Image: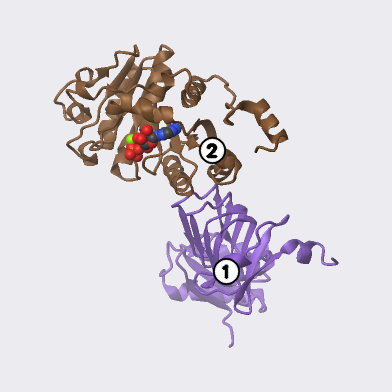
Chain colours: A purple, B brown
Amino acid sequence: MPRELVSIKGTREGLVILLDSTREFEDIKLHLKRKMESSRGFFRGARFAVYGQAITGRQRSELENICRQYGLIPSPEISWPLEKKVEQIKTVLPGEPARLVQGTLRSGQEIRHQGNVVIIGNIHPGARVVATGSVIIMGCCRGTVQAGAEGNTAATITALKLQAACLSIAGITASPAAIPRSSLFPITARLKGGRIIFDSYRHKAIYPAF
Amino acid sequence: MGEVIVVTSGKGGVGKTTTTANLGAGLAAHGHRVALVDADIGLRNLDVVLGLENRIVYDITDVTGGHCRLRQALIKDKRFEGLFLLPAAQTKDKTAVSPDQMKALCEELRQEFDYVIIDCPAGIEQGFRNAIAGADKAIVVTTPEVAAVRDADRIIGLLEASELRDPKLIINRIRPRMVRHGDMMSIEDIIDILAIDLLGVVPEDEAVVISTNRGEPVVQDERSRSGQAYRNIVRRIKGEQVPMMKLEEGGLMSRFLRRMMGLS
Ligand SMILES: Nc1ncnc2c1ncn2[C@@H]1O[C@H](COP(=O)(O)OP(=O)(O)OP(=O)(O)O)[C@@H](O)[C@H]1O
Ligand SMILES: [Mg+2]
């Protein structure tokens, strides 16, 4: 698709003036002036930002000055999604957001969350966590935990200690007899072959040689 | 200005009323001015345990309803100087008092008394809400049973949600021999689950039943173990450091000898 030298987009925050910076700067300038001229003051008072990949600071202020002459107000904080995306890709780290719960859940208390949940505390008998993602308990779990509540079979449940807990992942419930009673290390419950299995992640992740 | 302490449990029949009566009498025996408030409206008990039932003229709903002054409704105990009871109404239900009225009542009482102790009804509904409304501290009573501990846990969560932080625990009716044989939850088991501070442990004791029927709080019974347990709790409420009493019958030496002889 042949790009215009200068195109003007309206966003919620104001106008975004997009430049094809592969073209001659003088042409861009001329084109911008023409656009402003033909708008007959339509843009007067509007806030705008200039977006172009390879323009220098001086070129940018030249273009901004042209717009000013037609009554526009430069506002560099106006964002443009295309540019934002490029930035995001650069800064995104692996991982997912989680809801952090500081404190123990007592009998009758419940956390429901779309996503992952991390509890810094214990889950007492009669307390419940329901999450569409994974659940991590930095404490002892004696209550009910439902991970992958909307069917996410990759969800897991990790606890420092499990005691008579009632666990399910994606609607599949762990048989109480299968839940390890004691372990020196945190235990992770995950789905495998349609059943919940338990492992201590220490062996896999930290000392793979063992 | 006195402090307002609510005695609560969740589960019924675990010893709230017994605890309230004994702490009240015990604190009064130390020379404090104490008001006991029976918030169990409709199931009035505290007056009976204190042996004051036939002196009731006005009750708590008469005060909140403006039918009498607080002073008129307070019953003075004849044995313990400084101990007063504000009885519950027997003919009404929990909705007869509102949390705001309770708050106002507690404010008025704390001007006059060193301790205001509120006997909470069982459950988590309106009666519970009323009883805790004006309190600044809470004592949770449980027995060594899974259901009672579960309910205590629920209550602690609700207390914390109502800004009554750091409630203290009393474990009532423990039977050391059963604990030793693994037939009853131990103090450690209960503390491990509830994760709150222990204020005291009261053993199962016939003396409680006898004293309750006589309307004489067991705390004044010098010989009973439950009386000793309550006296210890009273001193802890006053801020003293009192070690937990040994609950094993017979004491350490005889236990040691019995083990030597293969008797236990
Ligand atoms: N340590 C004890 N040893 C023996 N009996 C006890 C002990 N503590 C309480 N009891 C008995 O248990 C019964 C219930 O006690 P109490 O009335 O104090 O419980 P409560 O929690 O106030 O009950 P409710 O929920 O009905 O108000 C009473 O008959 C009392 O005498
Ligand atoms: Mg009672």
B211 shown above or below A33: above
- Mark 1 is surrounded, within 10 Å at the Cα level, by few (under 14), some (14 to 19) or many (20 or more) other residues, namely few
Mark 2 and mark 1: Cα distance apart in space: 31 Å
B96 shown above or below B233: below
**Position in image of residue B117 (x %, y %):** 37, 26
B21 shown above or below A130: above
Circle 1: residue type: Ser
Callout 2: SS? loop
Q: Are marks 2 and 1 in contact (CB under 8 Å)?
A: no
Circle 2: residue type: Ile
Q: Pointer 1: what residue?
A: A175
Which residue is most to the right? Answer: A209
**Position in image of residue B192 (x %, y %):** 58, 43
Q: Residue at x 46, y 48 (%)?
A: B150
For disc 2, the chain is B
The tag on residue B196 is 2
Q: On the rendered image, what quadrant is the N terminus of chain A found in?
A: bottom right
For this view, does A137 lie left or right of residue B72? right
Q: Residue at x 44, y 45 (%)?
A: B148
